[in-house]
Image (cartoon, grey):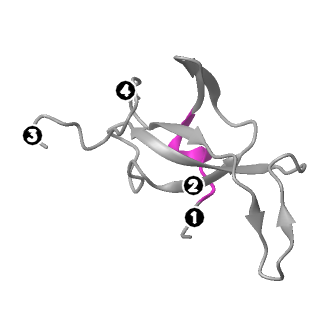
Amino acid sequence: MIGENPRRIDSNLEPLDDFVVIHPTEDESETRTGLIIPPSAETNCVTGIVTAVGVEAIGILPGDKVLYPKDAGYEVRLAGSAVRVLRRCELIARVHD
């Protein structure tokens, strides 16, 4: 769409520099052997969907599903919804489902 920022989707935050905005996911994961791991299980990493990226956040696009440390970055509440704002270098991997 004309006038739409391609570096943001459904986000009121516009990250600067190499920051990214992530909406954490709360879905269960299933291993290849069929073991279901609920989101409440203790883990050091979580997944989320990137909703906005700063101009210096190279290689990440809005809509990407990413893996990052549970306590990375900053938690920000927008209209009752929690998002994480963290630096691009804190991301561990892109997840391909």
Residue 33 shown left or right of residue 97 in the figure: right
Closer to the N terminus: mark 3 or mark 1?
Answer: 3
Closer to the N terminus: mark 1 or mark 4?
Answer: 4
Based on the displayed image, in which of its 4 quarters is residue 73 positioned? top right
- Label 2 sits on residue: 66
Q: State the mark number for residue 95.
A: 1
Dot 3 falls on a residue whose secondary structure is: loop
How far, Cα to Cα, is label 1 from label 4?
Answer: 23 Å
Q: Nearer the viewer, mark 3 or mark 2?
A: 3
How far, Cα to Cα, is label 3 from label 1?
Answer: 29 Å
Image position of 78 with respect to 31: above or below: above
Q: Within 10 angstroms of label 3, few (less than 14), some, or many (20 or more) residues?
A: few
How far across and how far down the image is residue 11, in percent?
40, 30
How far, Cα to Cα, is label 4 from label 3?
Answer: 18 Å
Range drawn in magenta: 85-93
Residue 14 shown left or right of residue 49 in the figure: left
Image position of 53 with respect to 97: above or below: above
Amino acid at pointer 3: Ile
Based on the displayed image, in which of its 4 quarters is residue 84 positioned? top right
Based on the displayed image, in which of its 4 quarters is residue 32 positioned? bottom right
Q: State the mark number for residue 2.
A: 3
Q: Within 10 angstroms of label 4, few (less than 14), some, or many (20 or more) residues?
A: some
Closer to the N terminus: mark 3 or mark 2?
Answer: 3
Dot 2 falls on a residue whose secondary structure is: strand
- In this view, the residue in front, 80 or 5, is 80
Is the C-beta separation of discs 1 and 2 under 8 Å?
A: yes
Q: Within 10 angstroms of label 2, few (less than 14), some, or many (20 or more) residues?
A: many
Dot 4 falls on a residue whose secondary structure is: loop
How far, Cα to Cα, is label 3 from label 2?
Answer: 27 Å
- Label 4 sits on residue: 14
Residue 75 shown left or right of residue 35 in the figure: left
